[in-house]
Image (cartoon, rainbow, N blue to C red):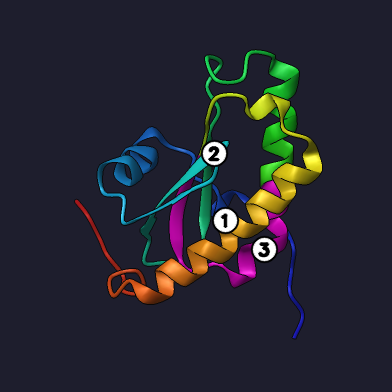
Amino acid sequence: MSLRYRFPRTHRLLRPAEFKTVFDSTAIKVGEQHFLLLTRPNGLDHARLGLVIAKKKVRLSVDRNQIKRHVRDSFRLNQHELPAVDMIFMARQELATVPAEVLRQALKNAWRRLQRKAASTPDSGSAQTSP
């Protein structure tokens, strides 16, 4: 089996309406000390990721961009093990001070927790459509 470790546009939340849908109907929350994942089933055969890293939480654009790169890379490498959900990564205070290796490990733990929660939630596997 050949897995492709890419991050195409089809695996991203791009439009404000897509973000709003996740914010309005969050099914699973996975919280870590420095970030929060909000998710909802998407009815597709793959997970999609959106990033919310507010300037208020992470002041420097260099830090925001570096965090985005780490999150995207971790998602890209773990996407085949994730349930079919739309998820939003939200930064919390002091995320910029977290070393890259600690962030990677926290993301790995969050993906694992998301898998467990999705497996135990009856709605998470079903396709949901919203108007």
First to last magenta residue range: 72-89
Residue ranking furthest to the front: 33
Query: Left or right of 126: which side holds 47?
Result: right
Residue 31 is marked as none
- Residue 80 part of the magenta segment: yes
- How far separated are the C-alphas under marks 2 and 1? 10 Å
Query: Left or right of 33: which side holds 23?
Result: left
Q: Earlier in the sequence, mark 1 or mark 3?
A: 3
Q: Residue at x 28, y 70 (%)?
A: 123
- How far separated are the C-alphas under marks 1 and 3? 11 Å
- Please say if 121 is above or below 1: above
Residue ranking furthest to the left: 131
Amino acid type, callout 1: Ala
**Disc 2 and disc 1 in contact, CB within 8 angstroms:** yes
Amino acid type, callout 2: Phe
Query: Left or right of 29: which side holds 107?
Result: right
What residue does disc 2 label? 35
